[in-house]
Amino acid sequence: MTMASTVLDRLHWVERVARDETMKYPRVLLLHGIGGSARSCGPVANRLAARGISSWCLDAPGYGESADPRPGDDIVADVNELIGALSPDRPVVLLGTSWGGVVATAVALRRPEIIAGLILADSTRGSGTTSAKSDAMLSRIDELNTLGAPAVAAQRAPRLTAPAADPAVVDAVRRSMADVRPAGFRAAAAFMADTDHGPELSRIGCPTAVLVGEHDVVTGVEESQLLADAIRGARLHVIADAGHVAVQEQPDAAADLVADFVRELT
């Protein structure tokens, strides 16, 4: 595997090229969750490379090494443009975790021709399904501003993993959340609060897989089942011994599922 870190037009991503890459497989673009970064996607991306599948892990605007979002910026348009730059002649597979899955769903709805397949990991329709959920998501902006990212991370990180999670994984999740910047989180939370993809899910026509940790108490297995039921032909896979960050907790199991999905597209 070769790995390269790139910053272009305010966005940063990490590319992993499989040593035995075969061009019959589409590449995978990984979108992290609201408390993550490109680094959060690294464990599963490394394992995909070992399975012959190349990928890009994006730092969303305001996260990791990407610049903060500007007023009026559109994360969905940013992802659309990045796909056009990275893979102009071939659709890609989008793998989004939690908020990243909501963004991935929006991309698939807006630009279906650039998406070969969609993988939603521990994701949701968005937080705009009810006013209470929308308000709760927006309240997290004030919480972050008041307490600071490290304190929020210390409170929330343990809820994201399975009860028997590897302490090293729990610590990695906490450190990632502690690095969250207000500008990035504010934009992500506002996007979530304003989004309800429920009425549109039946329009998704690309092959879709839904992954969820069996111990996910944040979005939950029930929400993932709803996504799988609403998207035509989607299949639900429950990952054992994992919580809300299933692709980080069980990267081998996740990579096996993703690799099988990608191979079936050819």
Image (cartoon, rainbow, N blue to C red):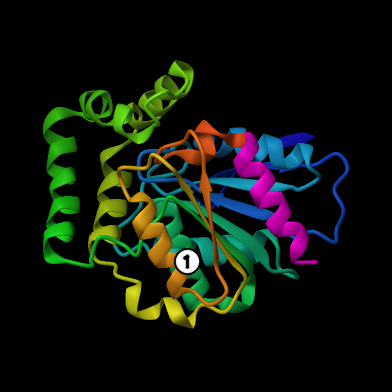
Inspect the image, locate mark 1, and give the three-letter code of the amino acid beneath it.
Ala
Lateral position of residue 136 relative to residue 154, left or right: left
Q: Where residue 56 sits in the image (x, y, percent)?
A: 64, 47
Q: Does the magenta stretch include residue 72?
A: no
Q: Residue at x 41, y 20 (%)?
A: 171
For label 1, the residue is 228
Q: Where residue 5 sits in the image (x, y, percent)?
A: 64, 37
Q: Where residue 198 sits in the image (x, y, percent)?
A: 34, 73
Residue 266 visible here: yes
In-front residue for pair 200/83: 200
Lateral position of residue 155 relative to residue 25, left or right: left
Lateral position of residue 230 relative to residue 192, left or right: right
Q: In which quarter of the image is the N terminus?
A: top right
Residue 5 visible here: no
Q: Give the range drawn in magenta.
A: 252-266
Quarter of the view holding residue 46? top right
Q: Residue at x 72, y 35 (%)?
A: 3
How packed mark 1 is, by other alpha carbons closer than 10 Å (few <14, some 14-19, many 20 or more), is: many
Q: Residue at x 77, y 58 (%)?
A: 263
Q: Element at badge 1?
A: helix
Q: Which residue is drawn at 71% across and 42% down?
A: 48
Image height of 61 relative to 206, above or below? above
Image height of 25 relative to 203, above or below? above
Quarter of the view holding residue 147? top left
Instruction: State whether the magenta stretch is mostly helix, strand or loop.
Output: helix
